[in-house]
């Protein structure tokens, strides 16, 4: 039973850290252009010849 005095605050703290990281990612623009990065790998933008 004494372990709950340690585990409950730990779980709340980890939850708040995860929420803070998600909000930080939203504000810093991590989720702005999901399609652009997915499509960028398909196209080769190098203008140099291969030979």
Image: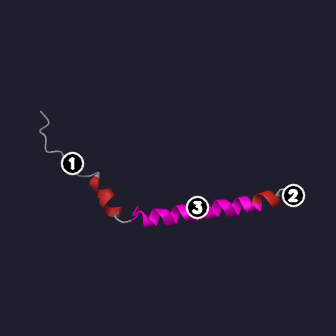
Q: Which mark is residue 44?
A: 1
Residue 23 image offset from top left, x and y in percent? 50, 66
Q: Residues within 10 Å of mark 1 (few under 14, many from 20)?
A: few
C-alpha distance separating marks 2 and 3:
25 Å
Q: Which sits in the foreground, 36 or 29?
A: 29
Q: Quadrant of residue 46?
A: top left
C-alpha distance separating marks 3 and 1:
36 Å
- Check whether the beta carbons of the residues at disc 2 and disc 3 lie within 8 A of each other: no
SS at badge 1: loop
Q: Would residue 15 appear left or right of 49 to someone viewing this image?
A: right
**Magenta stretch: includes residue 43:** no
Q: Residues within 10 Å of mark 2 (few under 14, many from 20)?
A: few
x 30%, y 60%: residue: 36
- Which residues, given as a range, are shown in magenta? 8-31
Residue 1 image offset from top left, x and y in percent? 88, 59
Q: Which mark is residue 18?
A: 3
SS at badge 2: loop
Q: Residues within 10 Å of mark 3 (few under 14, many from 20)?
A: few
Q: Which residue position is annotated with label 2?
A: 2
Q: Quadrant of the C terminus?
A: top left
x 26%, y 52%: residue: 42
Of the image marks 3 and 1, the number of the one nearer the N terminus: 3
């Amino acid at each position: 039973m004494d372990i709950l005095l340690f585990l409950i605050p730990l779980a709340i703290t980890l939850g708040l850290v995860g929420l803070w990281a998600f909000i930080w990612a939203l504000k810093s623009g991590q989720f702005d252009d999901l399609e652009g990065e997915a499509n960028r790998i398909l196209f080769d933008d190098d203008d140099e010849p291969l030979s």
